[in-house]
Image (tube, rainbow, N blue to C red):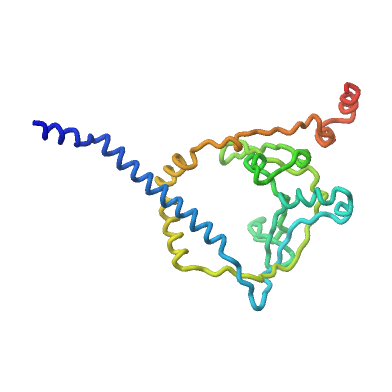
Amino acid sequence: MENNNLLFHRLRTVRSRKRIIKKDVEKQIRKKYKRSNELCQIRRNIPLIPLREPYQKGFVRFFVVREDVKRSRDGDFFEGILKKINTYSYSESRKFLKKKRKFGRRIYVPREQKLGRLSPYQWNSPKLGLTLRERQYFLKRENYCPVRKSTEVYYEFIEPWRFILRIRPNMITHYKPLDLELEKEYDALGSYLDQHKIKGIVLKKIYGKSCKWRCDDRKTHLIESIKYFHYTMSATEFADYLQDL
C-alpha cells in the first residue's frame, strides 16, 4: 500500500507535464538566443585585413560642418552634434540620382539627403549622450503614418544650414575574412529564431523586461532656451516675456 502511494505521488499531472515542457522549450530558446548574440559579437570583432591594392567602389556623400561655422568658437560643438546625426549615401556616379515614374515613363531625379532624425529611444539613450545644450538645438515633431495608423515622434535638428554636403570617392581599403563554420551556425540560429512562434516567445520572455532609462523622459527646459523662442514665438510675445522677467 505504501509503495502504491509513493508511485501515485511521483506521477505528474497533465498540467505539470505541460508546464515542464514549456519551461524546457523556453530554456532552449534562451540558450540559442544567447549563443546567437555571442556569434554576432564574434563576427563583429573579426579584425579587418588591409588590401594590397585598394579600389574605388562608386562615391559616398555625407555632411560636413561649413567652413565659417568650423572657424567660429562653436565649431567643435557642432562637430559633436554632426557625429550623432550624420547620414551617408552611396552611388555609382557623382550625380546621386534615383529612378522615378512620371507619366508612365521612368526618369532620373536627384536623390534627396537629409540629416538624421532622433527617435525617442535615441533621445533618451545614454549611449548617444546628448547634453542639455545639444538638446536645445532639436525640436520635437510628430508625423502621422496612415499605413500604421499611428503617430511617429522624432526630434529634428533646427539649424541644418550649418552643414553642407560633400562627395568623395568610396575607397575600399580593407576586407573582413569569413569563417564558414561560424557563418553556418549563425545562419542556422537566425533561421530558428526568426520563426513566428519563436519570435513571440523571445519578445515576451527576453525583451519584455522593463528598463528604467528607456522610459525616463528627460524633458529639456525649453522655456529657458532662447532657441525655442527664436523658432516658435513672435517678436511681440518674446518682448512681453522679457519684461515679465
The quadrant of the image that shows the C terminus is: top right
Q: Position of residue 104 (x, y in %)?
A: 63, 57
Q: Position of residue 21 (x, y in %)?
A: 30, 42
Q: Nearer the viewer, residue 80 or 91?
A: 80
Q: Is residue 224 above or below residue 76?
A: above
In screen coordinates, is 205 left or right of 95?
left
Determine which quarter of the picture holds residue 49: bottom right
Closer to the camera in the image, 107 or 59? 59
The residue closer to the viewer here, 102 or 219, is 219
The residue drawn where x is 70% and y is 67% is 170
Residue 46 falls in image quadrant: bottom right
| Residue placed furthest toward the front | 2
- Considering every residue shown, the one lying at the far left of the view is 1
Q: How many marks?
A: 0
Give the residue displayed 65% in from the left and 46% down from the top.
127
Find residue 25 and report its horizontal and vertical position in percent: 35, 45
Indicate left or right for 123 with 134 as reference: left
Residue sitting at the far bottom = 52
From the viewer's side, name the closer residue of 192 and 158: 192
Q: Residue at x 85, y 54 (%)?
A: 70
Q: Within the image, what quadrant is residue 105 found in? A: bottom right
Answer above or below: position of 97 versus 24.
below
Relative vertical location of residue 155 with respect to residue 244 in this rendering, above or below? below
Q: At which x and y percent is residue 17?
A: 26, 39
